[in-house]
Image: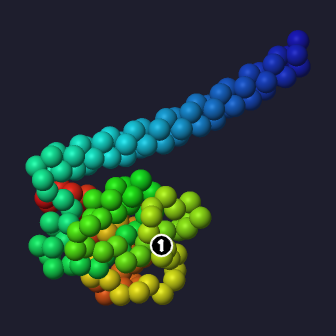
């Protein structure tokens, strides 16, 4: 009888351990989903404010003109970069080039796009559009360029 209980106990312990591992995986997945929700919520707030200032006749170009920056580079070639490019179109502010880790997935209409590891041409300022990871990107770029590096969040919320 003792020997029959031992395999059952081992199976129960193994099943419990497997269950704990699955719970940890689900918790980790839930944390990742919460992080994504937070980023999307931040995007919503930023874009909402951007629309408010556009409704007041203002533009991100106002920020760059006030700083005396006319030639900018943009890090991150997804949706926010495209919105920035559209907002600056026709102003005296020029997006000279873009920077992205995955050039093939670029959505922006910026013709020249470099990898962060490339030698980057001079610019008045670099604007980082994935502002949730701004600190990490800024550290990488500071080793390569002498110009200011700012987040899109700083630009939009400063207007």
Instruction: Give the quarter of the image for residue 121.
Output: bottom left
Judging depth in this view, the residue of 42 and 11 nearest the camera is 42
Judging depth in this view, the residue of 115 and 69 nearest the camera is 69
Q: x and y percent of residue 159 in the render?
A: 13, 58
Label tally: 1
Q: Label 1: which residue? A: 111
Judging depth in this view, the residue of 151 and 96 nearest the camera is 96
Residue drawn at 34 percent across, 63 percent down = 85
Judging depth in this view, the residue of 11 and 35 nearest the camera is 35
Residue drawn at 30 percent across, 65 percent down = 89
Asked whether residue 31 appears in the rendered view, the answer is: no
Q: x and y percent of residue 59 in the render?
A: 18, 59
Q: x and y percent of residue 136 in the render?
A: 40, 67
Residue drawn at 14 percent across, 60 percent down = 158
Instruction: Please identify the residue farthest to the top as the structure is shown.
Output: 1
Q: x and y percent of residue 124 in the render?
A: 27, 82
Instruction: Please identify the residue farthest to the front as the structure is shown.
Output: 90
Residue drawn at 40 percent across, 68 percent down = 75
Q: Measured along the vertical axis of the image, is residue 33 above or below residue 123?
A: above
Q: Measured along the vertical axis of the image, is residue 7 above or below residue 80?
A: above
Q: Measured along the vertical axis of the image, is residue 50 above or below residue 95?
A: above
Q: Is residue 10 left or right of 69 when viewed as pictured?
A: right
Q: Is residue 24 left or right of 43 when viewed as pictured?
A: right
Asked whether residue 85 appears in the rendered view, the answer is: yes
Mark 1, secondary structure of its residue: loop
């Amino acid at each position: 009888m003792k020997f029959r209980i031992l395999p059952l106990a081992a199976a129960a312990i193994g099943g419990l351990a497997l269950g704990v591992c699955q719970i940890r995986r689900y918790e980790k997945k839930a944390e990742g989903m919460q992080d994504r929700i937070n980023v999307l919520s931040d995007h919503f707030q930023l874009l909402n404010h951007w629309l408010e200032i556009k409704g007041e006749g203002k533009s991100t170009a106002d920020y760059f003109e006030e700083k005396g920056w006319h030639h900018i580079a943009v890090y991150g070639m997804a949706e926010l970069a495209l919105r920035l490019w559209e907002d600056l179109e026709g102003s005296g502010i020029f997006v000279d080039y873009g920077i992205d880790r995955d050039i093939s997935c670029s959505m922006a209409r910026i013709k020249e796009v470099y990898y962060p590891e490339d030698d980057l041409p001079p610019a008045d300022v670099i604007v980082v559009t994935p502002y949730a990871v701004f600190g990490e990107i800024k550290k990488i770029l500071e080793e390569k360029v002498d110009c200011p590096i700012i987040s899109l969040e700083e630009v939009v919320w400063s207007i």
